[in-house]
Image (spheres, rainbow, N blue to C red):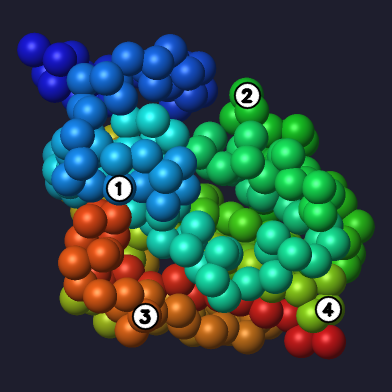
Amino acid sequence: MFKKIYKFLLRAIPRPWLIRLSYVFRLFAPIIYRGDNVECPVCEKKFRKFLSYGSKVAHRENVLCPYDLTLERHRLMWLYLKNKSNFFTDELNVMHIAPEQCFLDLFKHQKNIKYTTGDLESPIADLHFDLHNIPLEDNQYDVIFCNHVLEHVEDDHQCMTELYRIMKPGGWGIFQVPIDYSRKETYEDPSITSPEEREKHFWQYDHVRLYGLDYPDKLRAAGFEVEPYNYREEFPKEQYERMRLDPNELIYVVRKSE
């Protein structure tokens, strides 16, 4: 019964309200899922299993941490930040587009960074703006995060160039998107407008494209240098399976040359 109610709420409730309700949900979900089969590297808690998540087309079992609500991509990003970046050590000016709830409080309390969040409508964002025309000056941020946003926007190249514009020379960022690794080129069709058809073709009702293996080329076309991070080269299989990471997913770290 709990599982059916959970899946219904994911599909029926708008994202801003889901964000608010999740603060209540996290109070009792860890009790229901207590155990030691999976582990979240962000909250460092262990559970019997994670929750399911995703649309009918891209539904995944055992992926959503019941305490901090991380998904595979969040846990992967956290590992990169901890093991491969200067994010926790250097003084940095950080812009986080569409801030993930699982990171918000953690990043806000980091004394080494000046942390600002932006989104079109999220209730947890500091600034509200359209990513196609960011109302901020050039060369402001050492680090920019923009995860699972570009598949929603009308003109992703314009948004990428805006992110490039506000990044400082020598800055870096992480812009994760859903990628179909069996597809060489990004799939777009402006004639597909209904939520049902978008979910069928692009994996979610509010997506307007499905990225393929050409995604890093699109980032380069906006001016960025791109470095892939493959965690499978660093962790034993048992460890990344316990953290429930996607074995196909890479992080594409973008940089703006000095």
Badge 1 marks a residue whose secondary structure is strand
Q: Residues within 10 Å of mark 4 (few under 14, many from 20)?
A: some
Quote the CA–CA distance across marks 4 and 3: 29 Å
Badge 2 marks a residue whose secondary structure is loop
Residue drawn at x 80%, y 66% as measured from the top left: 90
Which residue is disc 3 drawn over?
234
Badge 3 marks a residue whose secondary structure is loop
What residue occupies the far right of the structure in this picture?
137
Which residue is disc 4 drawn over?
169
Q: Identify the amino acid type marked 1.
A: Glu
What residue occupies the far left of the structure in this picture?
1
Quote the CA–CA distance across marks 2 and 1: 29 Å
Quote the CA–CA distance across marks 1 and 4: 37 Å
Q: Which mark is residue 246?
A: none
* Upstream in sequence: badge 1 or badge 3: 1
Residue drawn at x 49%, y 75% as measured from the top left: 252
Q: Identify the amino acid type marked 3.
A: Glu
Q: Quadrant of residue 194?
A: top left
**x and y, in percent, of residue 113 in the image:** 80, 53
Quote the CA–CA distance across marks 3 and 2: 37 Å
Which residue is disc 2 drawn over?
123
| Left or right for 234, reference 108 | left
Considering the image in quadrants, where does the C terminus appear? bottom right
Q: Quadrant of residue 144?
A: bottom right
* Upstream in sequence: badge 2 or badge 1: 1
Considering the image in quadrants, where does the N terminus appear? top left
Relative vertical location of residue 214 with respect to residue 197 in this rendering, above or below: below
Which residue is disc 1 drawn over?
39
Q: Residues within 10 Å of mark 2 (few under 14, many from 20)?
A: some
Relative vertical location of residue 39 with respect to residue 5 in this rendering, above or below: below
